[in-house]
Amino acid sequence: MENLLSVIWVVRSGQNLESDLIALERMLAGRPAELIIVDDVDGEVLSISDASPSTQVLHHDHARGPAASFAEGARVAHGGSILYIESPFILQPSGLAALERDLRRDPHAGLVGPVQTGVSHNRVRMMPDYQDLDGMNDFARRVEKRYRGKVTQELLHDDGCFLVRRAALRDVQPDTGFQTSQGMAGDFSLRLWQAGWKVLAADDVYVHRNATGVTEDFVADSRRFHELHGFDISYSTNVRRDALSELDSGHAPQAVLEAGCAAGGTLCYLQGAFPKAELCGIELNDRAAAVARFFADVQAMDLEKLDHPAWHDKFDVILMCDILEHLRDPWQTVRNMYRMTRPGGRIVISVPNITYVSVFAEMLKGQWHYEDAGILDRTHLRFFTRETAMALLTQAGYHVAKVEWTLPDLPADLQELKKQLVPLLRGNMKEKYLEAYQWLIVGEK
C-alpha cells in the first residue's frame, strides 16, 4: 500500500495526553491514514473502546522504550511511509505534508525528520519565542516561511518524530536494545546510511515537544552506541554549524578539507549543500572514518607531519574545529594546512578559551581539575587565549579575517566573579574575553 500513511503514535507519559491527542487528530484531519497507538507506560493510561477499523491500540504491561514501541508498531503497519511520533511531540498538519513531500521528492531518502529545540543535530535555526499554543503555531509558520522547501542532509536524526520509507524499514530494523529516543533514532539513522539510504532534515518543519515526566537514561544508550559503532554518538557526529556559516554565506566551494572529521557529520551536510564540491577529510579513528567515507575522501594522516603534495594549494576552505588543542604541535599543523590552502582560500579554526571566567573560578580555589569534556578536557594538550589562537594563524602566514566567539549564559556566581575580575585586566584583555567559551577564527591566505 504505497500511498497509505501509517502513523505510529507512542504514548510515553500520561502527562498532557488529552491535549497531545487533540493535536494528533488535528494533524491528521482530512488525511487518510492508518493509526497505530502504542501505550508504552507502566500501567494502562489510554483506553479507546470505540476505535475505528483504521486504528489499532497496542498496550504494554510495562514500559519498554521507544525502540521496542517503534518495532512493534512497524510490524503491524501497512503503509508505504510510516510516521513515528511520540506523545510529547506536536506536529502541524502542514509539517506532515512537507515531510511527505520531501520523502517523495528524493527516492534515495529513507528518513525525513523535522527540526526542533533541545537536540544535538536537527536543531531549529530560529530561537523559539512562544508561550502558548497560538504562539507555537505562529512560530511554526515563521519557520516554514523562512526555510520553505529547504532540506539538509543529516548524519543522525536524534529524537522521537520522523517519517520513514517502508522500503528503508525493510532494510533496517530499530535496535530494541536502545532505551531513549535519541539513542534509538541516532542508531537507526546511522544504519540507514550504511544500508544506502539518505537521512534528511526538513528545515521548514518545526515540531514542538511538551515537557514530560519521562526520565531517559542516555548515558547507557551512549555506551551502547559506542560499543556498536566505535565512536561517540554526540561528540563524533556533530555538525559544526558555527564553522559552516563561513561557507553558507559565500559562493559554493570547489574543494573542502576537514581535519579531524570524526564520523563526518559536517561532511554529510556539505555533500548535500554543495554536491559539486570535492570533499576530503582526515580522521584516525578507523570506524568513524568508515562512516565519513560515505560523504568524502577520508584519509588517516598525522596532521603534525602532514606533507601531501597532491593537496598543495588545493582547498579553498579548510575546517579545523576543536582539534588543535589535542595536538603536541598545533603550530606546525597550521603551517602544514597553509600549504594545502589555495591562494585566496580560508582556514576556519575553533579552540576553547582558557580565559573563560569558570577557569579563573577554579584557579582561585587552587584547583585545575581535568574533565571528560569542556575547556579542561583531559585530552587537551594545549590551551589558548584569543591572542595566542590568532597567532596560530599568523605565524603560518594567514591573515586573520574574522574572530567570533561562543557566549553562553553565565550563572549568577560567575557574573559576580567577572565583575570583580574586570578591574584587574591588563593589556589587550577585555571583559568579553572572560565570557567567551570558545574562539572561532577565520584566516585567509
Image: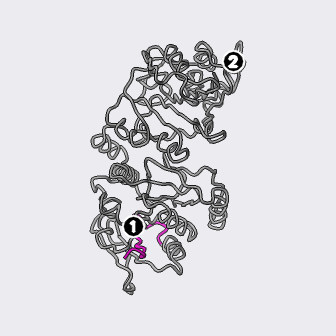
Residue 232 appears at what percent x and percent y? 37, 38
Within the image, what quadrant is residue 145 found in?
Answer: bottom right
Q: Quadrant of the C terminus?
A: top right
Q: Nearer the viewer, residue 61 or 282?
A: 282
Side (left or right) of 194 relative to 202? left
Would residue 85 be counted in the magenta stretch? no
Side (left or right) of 54 relative to 68? right
Within the image, what quadrant is residue 206 found in?
Answer: bottom right
Q: Give the magenta-colored segment's residue range.
A: 1-17
> Local crowd at mark 2 within 10 Å, few (<14), some, or many (≥20)?
some
Closer to the chain start, of discs 2 and 1, is: 1
| Residue 26 numbered mark, or none | none
Question: Dot 1 corresponds to which residue?
Answer: 10
* Mark 2 residue element: loop
Reply above or below: 239 against 319: below
Which residue is painted at 53% across and 79% down in the image?
29
Side (left or right) of 126 relative to 54? right
| Residue 429 numbered mark, or none | 2
> Local crowd at mark 1 within 10 Å, few (<14), some, or many (≥20)?
many
Q: Nearer the viewer, residue 60 or 28?
A: 28
Q: Are marks 2 and 1 in contact (CB under 8 Å)?
A: no
Residue 159 appears at what percent x and percent y? 44, 55
Q: Nearer the viewer, residue 267 or 54?
A: 267
Q: Quadrant of the N terminus?
A: bottom left
Within the image, what quadrant is residue 107 found in?
Answer: bottom left
At label 2, which amino acid type do we have? Met
Reply above or below: 95 against 445: below
Which residue is painted at 43% across and 23% down in the image?
370
Which residue is painted at 47% across and 28% down in the image?
259
Total tally of numbered discs in the picture: 2
Residue 72 appears at what percent x and percent y? 29, 67
